């Protein structure tokens, strides 16, 4: 009798479990050389539901993918025209602005989660936690925040695509995120969120390393390890190249 009852007791426990995300990316490392013109990341994976099938009668779940670069401190200056000359006016400093941010979703993010959830998980360009260091009025901070997002959008470093994620049979998903040529180096994260009825049911993270390679990597390491020597060599090369250019011009 005990052997027959035990499996029945396990059924409610299994059916009450949350789904699990199994994500992956097409490249775990991206090397930047002198000829680097950008790359395209394919983010894909599967949703594992308890029992191995999508629950019947429930709304389809949404997938949101967020790719973030390392955070950095930024000083943002506002230009103002005085007597016909553009001068620096007000400024704002941020402690932890992401150097790169891209969000891809199966629907517009405003249709998937409410404003509070967007702020908690930083879902969307309007929900980034930039951590300003100044004590300016909220409207001033909001203006600078919009300016920072706009500048990075135009540089291709902040991206938002509300229809980039494709979900197949409610189980498999995939999305493509473009990496621009001007992308900073460092450890990136690709976060995947499974959302239904405005609630985050599961989340998973994969790391991506973007690094310089070849001569660019040598120069970057030299600049980091020996700043003074790097500066002297750079100045010396500039003087030498200038002298050579002048010598060639006199000969022609």
Image (cartoon, rainbow, N blue to C red):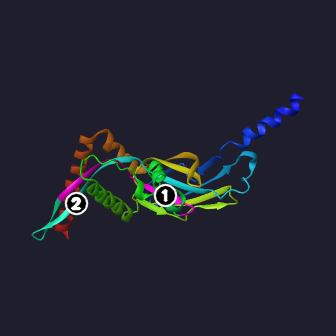
Left or right: residue 50 versus residue 86 is right
Nearer to me, 210 or 206: 206
x then y, percent, for residue 95: 32, 45
Nearer to me, 36 or 118: 118
Q: Residue at x 73, y 40 (%)?
A: 14
Circle 1 SS class: strand
Left or right: residue 12 versus residue 5 is left
Q: Which mark is residue 78?
A: 2
Q: Residue at x 74, y 51 (%)?
A: 53
For the C terminus, the quadrant is bottom left
Q: Which mark is residue 113?
A: none
Left or right: residue 3 versus residue 81 is right
x then y, percent, for residue 102: 46, 57
For label 1, the residue is 103
The answer to which of marks 2 and 1 sits earlier in the sequence is 2
Going by the picture, which residue comes out furthest to the right? 1
For the N terminus, the quadrant is top right
Q: Find the magenta span and give its range.
A: 89-107
Q: Magenta stretch mostly in which secondary structure?
A: strand
Circle 2 SS class: strand
x then y, percent, for residue 33: 43, 55
130 versus 161 height, above or below: above
Q: Quadrant of residue 80?
A: bottom left
x then y, percent, for residue 219: 35, 48
Left or right: residue 65 versus residue 212 is right
81 versus 171 height, above or below: below
Q: Is residue 34 visible?
A: no
Q: Is residue 112 visible?
A: yes
Q: Is residue 20 magenta?
A: no
């Amino acid at each position: 009798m005990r052997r027959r009852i035990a499996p029945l007791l396990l059924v409610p426990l299994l059916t009450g479990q949350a789904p699990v995300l199994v994500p992956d990316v097409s490249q775990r490392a991206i090397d930047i050389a002198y000829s680097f013109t950008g790359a395209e990341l394919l983010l894909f994976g599967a949703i594992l539901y308890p029992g191995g099938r999508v629950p019947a009668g429930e709304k389809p779940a949404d997938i949101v993918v967020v790719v973030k670069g390392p955070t950095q401190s930024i000083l943002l200056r506002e230009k103002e025209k005085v007597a016909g000359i553009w001068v620096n006016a007000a400024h704002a400093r941020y402690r932890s602005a992401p150097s790169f941010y891209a969000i891809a979703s199966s629907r517009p993010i405003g249709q998937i989660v409410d404003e509070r959830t967007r702020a908690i998980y930083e879902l969307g360009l309007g929900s980034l936690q930039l951590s300003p260091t100044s004590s300016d009025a909220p409207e001033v901070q909001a203006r600078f925040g919009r300016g920072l997002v706009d500048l990075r959008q135009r540089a291709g470093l902040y991206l938002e695509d509300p229809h980039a994620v494709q979900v197949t049979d409610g189980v498999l998903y995939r999305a493509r995120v473009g990496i621009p040529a001007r992308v900073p180096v460092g450890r990136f994260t690709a976060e995947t969120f499974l959302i239904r009825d405005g609630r985050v049911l599961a989340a998973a993270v994969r790391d991506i390393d973007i690094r310089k390679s070849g001569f660019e990597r040598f120069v970057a390491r030299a600049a980091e390890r020996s700043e003074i020597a790097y500066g002297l060599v750079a100045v010396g090369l500039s003087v030498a190249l200038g002298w050579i250019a002048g010598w060639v011009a006199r000969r022609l």
